[in-house]
Every structure is written in structure tokens, then in C-alpha cells.
Amino acid sequence: MTAGEVAVDLASAWVVFTESGARADMLAGCGATTTELVRARGWAVLLGATLLDEGWGTDTTHAAIGAAALTRVVADT
């Protein structure tokens, strides 16, 4: 489903990196286009929402990761 979709890889910036500077450095280092970054934000929202939903009431670690990713996407917008 996502084979070759660079935006999925870029979406990890919001899931993995807690500091906005680290996210900016990672995304800049990848040389992503504006279009790829827009798609990456969309994928990050999907990943964050999926983790939050999956962890809701059953796996608080996944829920926390998802909530943090969504917060980071909003903060960087």
C-alpha cells in the first residue's frame, strides 16, 4: 500500500522526534518537496490517530505516542 511513498517515511518525524528542531533537520536533510511534506503531515495524522485509537484503554504507551504525534503535527503547522 505504501511502497515507494516517501511521505510515509517522512511522517515518522512527528512520531519519533520530540524536538521541533530535530524534525526540521530530518525533513530538510531528506530534501522533501512541499507536496511530500503536506502528504507526510497527513500520514502523521493518520499514524497518530491510529496509535491513539489502538491504545485507547488497552495500551497506554501507544495512546501516548499517538497523542504526542498529533500534538507535534499541530505545533509544527
Image (cartoon, grey):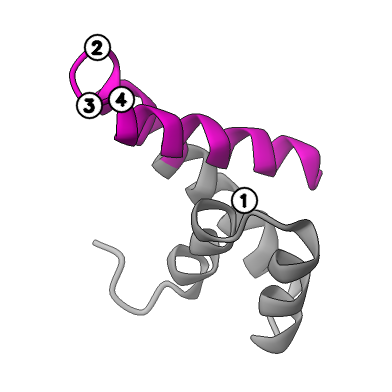
**Residue extent of the magenta highlight:** 48-77
Residue drawn at 79 percent across, 47 percent down:
76
45 falls in the magenta region: no
Look at the numbered disc 2 and give the secondary structure of its residue.
loop
Residue 21 screen position, x and y as percent: 80, 66
The secondary structure that dominates the magenta segment is helix
Look at the numbered disc 4 and give the secondary structure of its residue.
helix
Residue drawn at 52 percent across, 66 percent down:
7
> Which residue has dot 1 on it?
41
Look at the numbered disc 3 and give the secondary structure of its residue.
loop
Per the model, the C-alpha gap separating discs 1 and 4 is 23 Å
Look at the numbered disc 1 and give the secondary structure of its residue.
helix
Per the model, the C-alpha gap separating discs 4 and 3 is 4 Å
> Which residue has dot 2 on it?
57
Per the model, the C-alpha gap separating discs 2 and 3 is 6 Å
User: In the picture provided, is 56 more to the left or to the right than 31?
Assistant: left
Q: Residues within 10 Å of mark 4 (few under 14, many from 20)?
A: some
> Which residue has dot 3 on it?
59
Callouts 4 and 3 close, C-beta under 8 Å: yes
